[in-house]
Structures are given as structure tokens and as C-alpha cells.
């Protein structure tokens, strides 16, 4: 059950960051969004086929990239907002 919470967190963070952006500008955003889509597709495939052990390490690498990218995007947006208020 703890794993489900992690998946929900990953989906929520990725959706929150990448849904707000209308254009993916920069390599970092494109790679993060691509890895996010790969994670979503992997989780969808696991609903129907639970025996894909070969791709699990790649999923965790993509998950790390997505979380790092979303955290960085959240930091940028928070700093931008605080500067606008000043």
C-alpha cells in the first residue's frame, strides 16, 4: 500500500508541473516530460502485465528524473512568484 502512495505522488507532481506549461521550452523540461510519460505508461502496463522485471530499473531511473525535474520546476515557480510580489 505504501507503493501506491508513491505512485500517486509521482502522478500528482508530474501532472501539476507539466499541465501548467503550455510549451516545453528547454531540454530539461522536455526530458522531464518524456520521463513522466514513460512512467505513466509503465504504471499502466503494470495493471495488465505484472511480469516485466527487465524494465523495472529503467522505471526507477525515469522516476528519479521526473521527481528531480518537478522539484526544480516548483522551486523556479516559487522563486518567480516571490520576486513578482516584491
Image (cartoon, grey):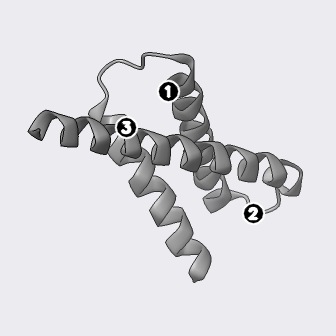
Q: Nearer the viewer, mark 1 or mark 3?
A: 3
Residue at 20% over, 43% down: 82
Name the secondary structure under disc 2: loop
Kindly identify the residue that appears in the image at 67 percent across and 58 percent down.
Answer: 46
- Quarter of the figure that contains the N terminus: bottom right
In the image, is residue 31 above or below residue 83? above
List x then y, in percent, for residue 51. Answer: 82, 61
Q: How crowded is mark 1: few (under 14 residues within 10 Å), some or many (20 or more)?
A: many
Q: Picture quarter containing residue 41?
A: top right
Name the residue that disc number 3 marks.
Answer: 76
For mark 3, give the secondary structure: helix
Q: Where is residue 67 in the image (x, y as percent from the top left)?
A: 56, 50
Q: Give me the C-alpha separation between circle 1 and circle 3.
A: 12 Å
Query: What is the C-alpha distance between the residues marked 2 and 3?
Result: 37 Å
According to the image, label 2 marks what residue? 50
Residue bearing the label numbered 1: 29
Nearest the eye: 13 or 39: 13
Image position, residue 69 (x, y; %): 53, 40
Earlier-in-chain disc, 2 versus 1: 1
Label 3 Cα crowd, 10 Å radius (few <14 / some 14-19 / many 20+): few
| Dots 2, 1 in contact, CB < 8 A | no
Query: Which residue shows up at 64% across the image and 42% down it?
Result: 65
Residue 37 vertical placement versus 15 (above, below): above
Label 1 sits on a secondary structure element that is helix
Choose between 53 and 28: the one closer to the eye: 28
Locate the C terminus and report the quarter of the image it occupies. Answer: top left
Amino acid at each position: 500500500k505504501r507503493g501506491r502512495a508513491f505512485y500517486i505522488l509521482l502522478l500528482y507532481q508530474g501532472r501539476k508541473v507539466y499541465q501548467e506549461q503550455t510549451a516545453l521550452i528547454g531540454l530539461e523540461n522536455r526530458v522531464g516530460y518524456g520521463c513522466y510519460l514513460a512512467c505513466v505508461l509503465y504504471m499502466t502496463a503494470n495493471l495488465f502485465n505484472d511480469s516485466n522485471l527487465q524494465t523495472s530499473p529503467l522505471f526507477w531511473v525515469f522516476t528519479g528524473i521526473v521527481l528531480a525535474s518537478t522539484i526544480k520546476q516548483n522551486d523556479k515557480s516559487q522563486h518567480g512568484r516571490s520576486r513578482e510580489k516584491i
